[in-house]
Image: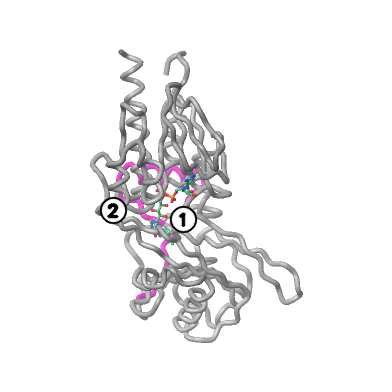
Amino acid sequence: MSAAPRPSVAIVGAGIAGATCARALADAGFAVQVFDKSRGVGGRMASRRAEWTGPDGSAQPARFDHGAPGFEARSEAFVRVVEAAERDGVLARWAPVIDQDGRLGRDDVPQWVPTPDTPALCRALLADLPLVTGCTVDTLRREPGGWSLEAGGDRVAHGVDSVVVAIPLPQAAVLLAPHRPDWAGRARAVAMRPCWTLMAVTDAPAPLPAWDLAQPSTGPTGLIVRSDARPGRTRVPGRAHWVVHASETWSRAHVEDAADDAQAHLQAALAQHVGQPLAWHHASAHRWRYAHAPADAAVPGLCDWDADASLGACGDALGGAGVEGAWLSGRALAARLVARYREAARA
Ligand SMILES: Cc1cc2nc3c(=O)[nH]c(=O)nc-3n(C[C@H](O)[C@H](O)[C@H](O)COP(=O)(O)OP(=O)(O)OC[C@H]3O[C@@H](n4cnc5c(N)ncnc54)[C@H](O)[C@@H]3O)c2cc1C
């Protein structure tokens, strides 16, 4: 970029798509501001703190990665990035022992796990960038002086050259509808899959399971993760930390259930899979209404970009699903903005 004023970009969403886009734009010289409705960054690469009471009555901290437990990198570009993050200590390889209905095995493709917790990758990308958390952007206005963003009736940014919407498509549709009804209509039609998730601390079963990750093919659970057996996590002697994802079918059928009911079902299913009663110290359930994007919702170019309005959208659904799809989408949108401003600078 030249000495001309830096183009400014407001990015809504600090998940991996928004964080990737923000980092690429900041590195290219853009003035970036990021907004997220949550208290922290990471989005569906999330973790949650909890507390349980130890035998001596003391408060014991626990931390659960209740979003993506790990992810794969298949494209050459993403493999390069994750290997660099591994060298920086932000990601670790995970080759879990997998139990599929009693058959133990390992996948050929490594899983990547951010350390010490799942949001670490987004935190690293956003490290020195202006970030406002706890801010739910509900209106985008295009005004003569640029874009403005509003949250709960307050203007949180104004006079911004470009806006990037990096949130799950059903939520993005609300922001995009006044400006790009065609994108919003497409976004509403994408069937995101829900996932109920159980986070639990129990006494360690004896013996400990021979697996790190189980994928039962029957019952309500789709995935059982021995959370503290993942790389970079602390094991508490005598205890086991679990994250259980309900199957897609069960999550869809029970999406409107109360959290207590979902929790009770998943606790019972976990004990059944482990094959013995469990002594519970903590249990809670979280519903992800928009956990997974379908792989076939990807768009040509892996993002939406309107150069006239200087408005873009990125995220897992547009980029091909999962963490890698979201990363590809955020990166693709940043490239479109950089190209547009380089062209304008040459003209
Ligand atoms: C339980 C679970 C298991 C998963 N397992 C895997 C897996 O094994 N492998 C894999 O590759 N992927 C997995 N995924 C999917 C993966 O986590 C997502 O595809 C990816 O993280 C999506 O990133 P994103 O940046 O597109 O969106 P998000 O991570 O959803 O980020 C969007 C951000 O926008 C914020 N936001 C939303 N609305 C607003 C608003 N109006 N204003 C401000 N901020 C807003 C949110 O708080 C969030 O931080 C899993 C997801 C879940 C939930």
Crowding around mark 1 (Cα neighbors within 10 Å: few <14, some 14 to 19, many 20+) is many
Q: Is residue 50 left or right of residue 275?
A: right
In the rendered image, which quarter contains the N terminus? top left
* Closer to the camera in the image, 63 or 176: 176
Q: Which residues are magenta?
A: 71-100
* Closer to the camera in the image, 99 or 14: 14
Q: What residue is shown with label 2?
A: 189
Q: Position of residue 330 (x, y in %)?
A: 38, 40
* Closer to the camera in the image, 116 or 26: 26
* Closer to the camera in the image, 32 or 128: 32
Give me the C-alpha separation between circle 2 and circle 1: 31 Å
**Is 339 located above or below residue 63 in the figure?**
above
Q: State which quadrant residue 81 falls in.
A: top left
Q: Position of residue 247 (x, y in %)?
A: 37, 71
Q: Secondary structure at mark 2?
A: helix
| Residue at x-position 52% and y-position 51% | 119
Q: Residue flagged by tag 2: what amino acid is it?
A: Ala
Q: Is residue 96 magenta?
A: yes
Q: What residue is shown with label 1?
A: 113
**Is 333 located above or below residue 322 in the figure?**
above
